[in-house]
Amino acid sequence: MAQLPPGIRLITSFSRDQWYRAFIFSLTFLLYASFHLSRKPISIVKGELHKHCAASHEVELVSYKEYAAQIQPVKKPSNVSQCGWEPFDKNNYKQLLGALDYSFLCAYAIGMYLSGIIGERLPIRYYLTVGMLASGLFTAMFGLGYFYNIHNLWFYIMAQIANGLVQTTGWPSVVTCIGNWFGKGRRGLIMGIWNSHTSVGNILGSLIAAYWVSTCWGLSFVMPGVIIAVMGIVCFLFLIEHPRDVSCSCTPSSSSKTFLNGAARFRVQMPTLNAKETSKPQDPEMQHLLTDCENCNVSLNSSTVVTVEGRHGTSAISFLGALRIPGVIEFSLCLLFAKLVSYTFLFWLPLYITNVEHLDAKRAGDLSTLFDVGGIFGGILAGLISDRLEKRASTCGMMLLLAAPTLYMFSAVSKMGLEATVVMLLISGALVNGPYALITTAVSADLGTHKSLKGNARALSTVTAIIDGTGSVGAALGPLLAGLISPSGWNNVFYMLMVADACALLFLLRLIQKELRCNADQTL
């Protein structure tokens, strides 16, 4: 009998469940990357919506004879302006561009609180598909303003508001789906890798938007709109909400145990353990990686029976009920300030690079992707460290503590040349996006499956929406404040970002203290 080819042996070495999990991991990664891909164009196009006008004394004067000889009428394209695109060609352009950011992010923040509650009551596949198709429509709608020569500010603001509302369907849906398919063990690392879709989407969005920004900026919006709409169709055709839908086990495991995660009804029967057995570490899939003192002192020398109702057998958690979960309020407020910093970079970094490095919109957009490259490594590193230490809050606090002085260095070093800017973009991206990535993924999933919920898996969408919705308030404030403060100097914007990082750390101090105290109790 002939030996199987190496490729076939590789395929058969993985189980059916593992292939399904790999497929859902990849699919949800691409789906949410397309959301961020469609958000990025506005930051790239800002440099084209407003250009630095040539000073009047720099305009060459021609004699009357030269003018008369060349007086043949040439029609100037109506969508071309010496200072950019009306109405953003005025001196108050920073405030107007800030209003566009604020319109999107404020709508996103308000819609996110409702999205999680609605998402719990609707099939994820349908809910996400409709949201992606609508996002494609409103993203392209902004770009159509170029082709139809629209110069009304309210047209662009309404497009941003509508897009912000429908984009709230994405995050609670994909986090709930990925939470259904993966258990708690190594969740930080898995979700740290998975959350790199944010940076990948930003990078692709920057490159796509930058390709057309100088020639036809309308396509910088239309093409991302088409991409997210196509991914919405892919979502409808292939997304599997829960492992039970294809008869897969609820969580990956290496033993015959059944674990807590997912919405199917099941029972866990744990035998009595003797003293020797209790000293052994628990299976990582069974551990609550968000440490609390109850977990520190839990005893396993008695029989434990846990019953979890099916998706239709449990009631959806209320908004106030979700707020009572330990850690939700602290992490939500921390994310408010962490996301304020991250989204200020997302929306204003290309324009900052254009002003400081004196690059055109395309080159500034390409260079800004390095911040997201750093964010990929930061998210993975935060997940890896938090899994190893089993301390989510302490990991976030450490990175926030390092981020504030790094931002100060970035504001000073970026004026020294392009090479220094590249290095600081990578470091700042890692430290700014690390805590943001950890809180929105692993921490949200931990809290959404907290033991106080007694197995109610329907709470995950609401908890995720509350945390990310609160963070989105900061995401709305950051770009708005940047637009208001930047006329007084970019240094003041960086001071604002450093204060925000300090506030984010402040809200985690109680949880960090709790984790350290629990660690001390365990060592005794």
Image (cartoon, helix red, strand yellow):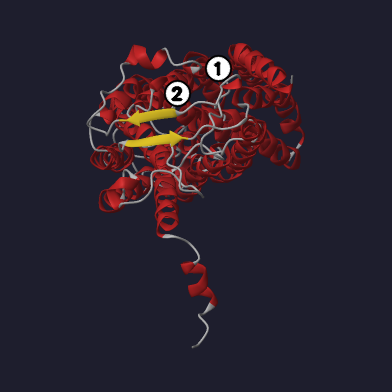
Measure the C-alpha gap from mark 2 to mark 1: 10 Å
Which residue is identified by label 1?
Answer: 294
Asked if labels 1 and 2 touch by Cβ distance under 8 angstroms, the answer is: yes
Q: Is residue 89 left or right of residue 56?
A: left
Image: 192 above or below 5: above
Q: Is residue 288 above or below residue 15?
A: above
Question: What's the amino acid at mark 2?
Answer: Lys
Residue 87 seen in the current view:
no
Farthest residue to the bottom: give it. Answer: 1
- Residue type, numbered disc 1: Glu
Q: Tell me if mark 2 has few (under 14), some (14-19) or many (20+) residues whose alpha carbon lies within 10 angstroms of its own.
A: some
Using the image as rendered, state which of residue 200 and residue 244 is in the foreground. Answer: 244
* Residue at left offset 29%, top offset 31%: 309
Q: Nearer the viewer, residue 1 or 326?
A: 1
Q: Tell me residue 440's x, y (percent).
A: 49, 29
Percent coordinates x, y for residue 395 in the rendering: 65, 27
Instruction: Give the SS element for disc 2.
Output: helix
Above or below residue 17? Residue 131 is above
Residue shown at 28% from the left, 29% from the top: 120
- Residue 292 found in image quarter: top right
State whether residue 467 is above or below residue 261.
Answer: above
* Residue at 50% over, 26% down: 302
Checking the image for residue 451, the label placed there is 2
- Left or right for 232, reference 372: left
Closest to the observer: 468 or 261? 261
How far from the left and from the top, in percent, is residue 271?
49, 35
Residue 412 image-quadrant placement: top right
Left or right: 483 in relation to 130: right
Residue 487 in the image, given as x and y percentages of width and height: 57, 17
The residue depicted at 58 percent of the width and 41 percent of the height is 189
Mark 1, residues whose alpha carbon is within 10 Å: few (<14), some, or many (≥20)?
few
